[in-house]
Image (spheres, grey):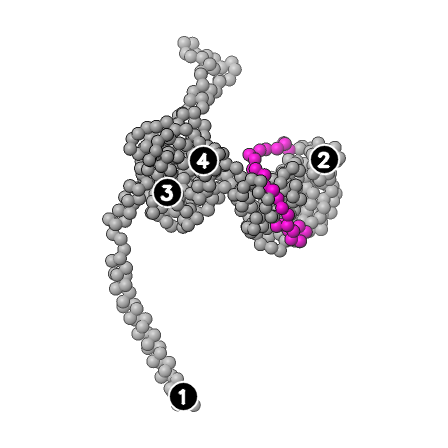
Amino acid sequence: MDVKMKSFRKSFIRARAMVFSLALAVAMSAPVFAQQNRAQLPSPSDLSRVFINVAKQVKPAVVNIDVVEKARRVSRLPEGFPQIPGMPEFGNQPPRRARGTGSGVIISPDGYILTNNHVVGEAVEINVKLADGRELKANRVGTDPETDLAVIKVDLQGLPFAKLGDSGKVEQGEWVIALGSPFGLSQTMTAGIVSATGRDLPGAGQFTNFIQTDASINPGNSGGPLVNMEGEVIGINTMIFSRTGGNEGIGFAIPSNLSSKVYAQLIKSGRVTRGYLGLYPRDVDPTLARNIGFNGEGGALVNDVSGRDTPAAKAGLRSGDIITEVDGKAVKTARHLTEIVSDLPVGKPVQVKFVRDGRVQTTTVTLGERPRPNETSPENDGSPEQDMGKLGISVQTVTPEMASELKLKIGTGAIVQSVQPASPAAEAGIRTGDVIHKINRIDVTSAQSLTRALEQVKGEKQIVLQIESREQLRFVTVDLE
């Protein structure tokens, strides 16, 4: 036993010595490896040459765009405002045409140019200045306000053009350059990195998961290309975040993959059409999933369908359904649902998989064409009947007259009369005029039944309300802590 132990100890010591020697050798050789790696790195001159070559490749396709917009009348002074003797009468000034400038990029040799809708969308006259100094009149081919993209065309053949790259392959940290005419200074190039991808900006549309960059983008850069180190256009510069109006290192570009889809439709028909279900979706958070009995992942909850004649309503979808798959593609979020459907052709029958009351079901929906969003009827006011201190609201029982006047889809409930500031209801976005139909899975048919329902969920940290307002049903998660 002692002999075996001694043998084991010797073997262990030898093994430890070998490991130590190997580690020492690696440590001693590290500077050599570092020197070799440094020797392989490009020199500043080599790095500069990359930027120079990209600029030479893309700049001939970048154009400066000057526009004259529709005439707008100068605002009249208030009635009775004194007129200065000898001066023109302010109220009778003729309409004035606004002028603007932006950028664009040629993407076909026969003169098609991709730019922003906000650059040329209201233009009555479009002038394009090429990189070689030639100035040409351009015609507007089509615009898409929802993505802020537009296509214009000059009547010339054999033009230099840029290649649209695959924005799906863009990674955070990549070097990029922005080209355009900031402040009217044409053929300006700035460099930076991709700060983020898939950036969702509130109020900037549902179809633009922007590329964020710290390459300097300023007024006038709009419509110009964001280019990778292969000389490919991976985005169309469109906006900045700024407190001063100038560059603060946060710029955004519309991804080239989206730009390519919009461009193809605008070239073909002058407009963009998108598939449409006709419903109001929202994300499925854990509290909502628990309270409606959904055990899956992802999905988009149907707050409501937007009308009886919509594709969703005709196919039997309704408030409370959770859509998990469309046309064979798994739905991750409400926004993802919109993106999937919008990419599908109008009139196409698609299979929609959804969960209702814990059961997976399937229906076929023939997609309509997505309309422009619009606002609906104003809120309803009334006198309070019962105080709901837990939520921070006062409510009144919905009468048949109220249901008729408000055109309620569900003819009973408790209508919100007032909302306390900073209350759980206020934080959840509940407003005066909203009608509560459910708390979790408990039906609410009156102010009194709302009180009873709140007693049943006593102790819950979060609850889910089904609410109807402006002729639309939706689900709201309320945090009671």
Q: Earlier in the sequence, mark 3 or mark 4?
A: 3
Instruction: In the rendered view, tell whether residue 358 sits above or below residue 423.
Output: below
Q: Earlier in the sequence, mark 2 or mark 1?
A: 1
* Residue appearing at x 50%, y 41% in the figure: 207
Please state which of the two labelled residues, at mark 1 or mark 3, is closer to the viewer. 3
Q: Which mark is residue 267?
A: 4
Q: CA distance from mark 3 to mark 4?
A: 16 Å
Callout 3: few (<14), some (14-19), or many (20+) C-alpha neighbours within 10 Å? Answer: some
Element at badge 2? helix
Which residue is farthest top?
86
Residue 4: which numbered mark, if any?
A: 1
Label 4 or label 2, whichever lies nearer to me, is 4
What amino acid is labelled 2 in the image? Ala
Q: Earlier in the sequence, mark 1 or mark 3?
A: 1
Secondary-structure class at tag 1: helix
Magenta-drawn segment: 353-379
Q: Nearer the viewer, mark 1 or mark 4?
A: 4
- Mark 2, residues whose alpha carbon is within 10 Å: few (<14), some, or many (≥20)? some
Crowding near pointer 1: few (<14 within 10 Å), some, many (20+)? few
Q: For the residue marked with disc 4, what is the amino acid?
A: Ile
Up the image or down, 232 lies above or below 149; here it is below
Q: 280 or 28: nearer the eye? A: 280
Q: Nearer the viewer, residue 89 or 373?
A: 373
Residue 114: in magenta span: no
Residue highlighted by disc 3: 163
Q: Which residue is mark 2?
A: 403
**First along the sequence among labels 1 and 4:** 1
**Which residue: 39% across, 47% down?**
194
| Contact check, label 1 and label 3, Cβ < 8 Å | no
